[in-house]
Amino acid sequence: MVKTPRAGEPVLELTGVGKQFGAIRALHAVDMQVSSGEVVGLMGDNGAGKSTLVKIIAGNFAPSSGEVRFDSKAVHFHRPVDARAVGIEVVYQDLALADNLTAAANVFLGRELKRKFGPIALLDHKAMAARALELFGELRSETRPHDLVKQMSGGQRQAVAIARTRLSNAKLVMMDEPTAAISVRQVEQVLSLILRLKEQGVAVMLISHRMPDVFAVCDRVIVMRRGEKRADKPIGDTSPEEVTALITGAKEAA
Amino acid sequence: MGLPMESPISFANVGQARWWQRGLFASQTGYVAVALLVLIVAMNFASPYFFTEGNIQNVAKNFSFIAIATLGVTLVIITGGIDLSVGSMMCFSAMVTSMVMTGLSTPGLPGASLFVHIAGDGKTVVANIPGVILLISVLAGLGTALIVGLVNGFCIAALGLSPFVTTLGMLSIVRGLGYVISNGRGASPAGPDADYFYALTSGEVSGVPAPFIYLVMLALLMAVVLHHTAFGRHVFALGGNEKAAELTGVSVVRVKIEVYVLCALGAGLQGIIVCGWLGSAPANMATSYELNVIAAAVIGGANLAGGVGGPLGAIVGCVLLEVIRNGLVLAQVNSYWQQTLVGVIIILAVLVDRVRSRMI
């Protein structure tokens, strides 16, 4: 396993990042930093620029202006695969799991472990199951590598999607509304999965509408409104009321 | 490893499915296979001729005539696609193979001088190693299938056309081309290598029909590819959640094209084999076979929504269709009932699967 980055080093730095879609200014001069072992909540109403920001970081499209630095190097992604190659993983809202495959198969989808038999490369089922079980163990999720994803609970599915990000030892994991569509008990599980990632020195960006979740796990909260960053505060220095005011625009900036 | 585990995971809250609730036993393929066995036993009582060697050989041969194409279509269906052009493809490949073989064996036709010449007594003599003509003509037939498969795959994967419409168009295009190249007359294999051709396609090895042997080999190969290679994994992933496959870095376009190519190749090979059995490739050969092939795949458990299916299911579906056909003949039931019954079975098989998956 590659060394986990020391807590406190900035992993992701954005300076003056903006994005224009024709005449529409989706994002304007956003500066932000995320450090390893830090959980940052990204909040904002629909259309505030959250997803645009996430998509720029994930390599779905390039910024119109500004600079993205990852691991102290300027990066220019053309496709999501490029972002993944340097250590940025995204857990999508719909989790991007194939229901008809097992947990282990989903974790390794697109990066299967193989064994060579002469010119033929066959899947190494054992190694993949063992590694998947190890990852589920790190996440303290009771998930069997051989179970089909379609038979799993929402929390287990989240664990599978998150385990996938651990496979490559990602340095930054962005989670898009991970708690939007699951039960209360499963929300607990997902939040503890986020804390597990933090323990292991991973920087986490949590994109969420749910105030209690953000206040439960995040160290810092960033509020977006109308394409601009309106606040960037340690969670201890703010309150749900203030964040709500910032999101709705009742308070302009903090 | 990152952090030591505080405690090993216990799985206390997570039950495991029992052996009869997962894998083959819980699949449509599993219980259609059981139904097939019951049917075979019943047939044994219904007709004393059913279990005679001749009849079993006949059944084995007959279902092999659609089963190889069914393997290919199953592959496409697993990805969530469909290929309606297999019937036409069977005919076209058979026709190309026959015409190339005849052409290369007839002195005077372009290219033939490399392979045959006329001896002093006026007979045609093979100019080089026997079997070369056969090899080239079969490769020509499969090559045509490859091209058709590439076009199908390109339109569907790269241009984003719907598989149904693309292959429906291809059904017509390929059938039409068959009429064009043979001027509507069809073609038959001829020349010095024709006997090898018949031996390889409709011969038998110690009582086992050759098509059945090819089928078993291809089915085993397909099982290994589907379950033990990354390509097979991606085929299933595509059918399960295409967007997820794309996001996780599976080269969706490539896998799709490969699947349609393999399907066309299966159909092409099937056509060539059927042509050897018929002794010719008439222009209307295998018309509407795509429906039998898709029916067999669906009865055997391939899910048209994608993500489920396999070679065993394809074979079980084909055998079931053939046993019913054969049984109705032996039981002296009016053979027109066959089609009706096949339709009923398609719906029943899918219905039972629906009921079962709701119960669990």
Image (spheres, coloured by chain):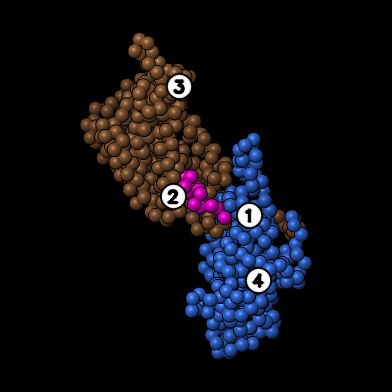
Q: Residue at x 40, y 15 (%)?
A: B125
| Residue at disc 2, secondary structure | helix
Q: Which badge, 2 or 1, is on the more N-terminal residue?
A: 1
- What is the letter of the blue chain? A
Labels 1 and 4 within one chain: no
Q: Residue at x 47, y 49 (%)?
A: B256
Q: In front: mark 2 or mark 1? A: 2
As shown in the figure, which amino acid type bears the numbered disc 1? Phe
Q: Any magenta on residue B258?
A: yes
Residue located beneath label 1 in the image = B11
Whether residue B200 is visible here, answered yes or no, is no
| Residue at disc 1, secondary structure | loop
Residue located beneath label 3 in the image = B131
Residue located beneath label 4 in the image = A68
Circle 1 marks a residue in which chain?
A: B
Residue located beneath label 2 in the image = B154
Q: In front: mark 1 or mark 4? A: 4
- What is the letter of the brown chain? B
| Quadrant hosting residue A15 | bottom right
Circle 3 marks a residue in which chain?
A: B
Q: Residue at x 74, y 55 (%)?
A: A1
Principal secondary structure, stretch drawn in magenta: helix
| Quadrant hosting residue B227 | top right
| Residue at disc 4, secondary structure | strand
| Residue at disc 3, secondary structure | loop
Q: Which residues are magenta?
A: B249-259
* In the displayed structure image, the side of residue B231 where residue B204 appears, left or right: left
Labels 3 and 1 within one chain: yes
**Looking at the image, do the residues carrying marks 1 and 4 touch, with CB atoms under 8 Å apart?**
no
Q: Which badge, 3 or 1, is on the more N-terminal residue?
A: 1
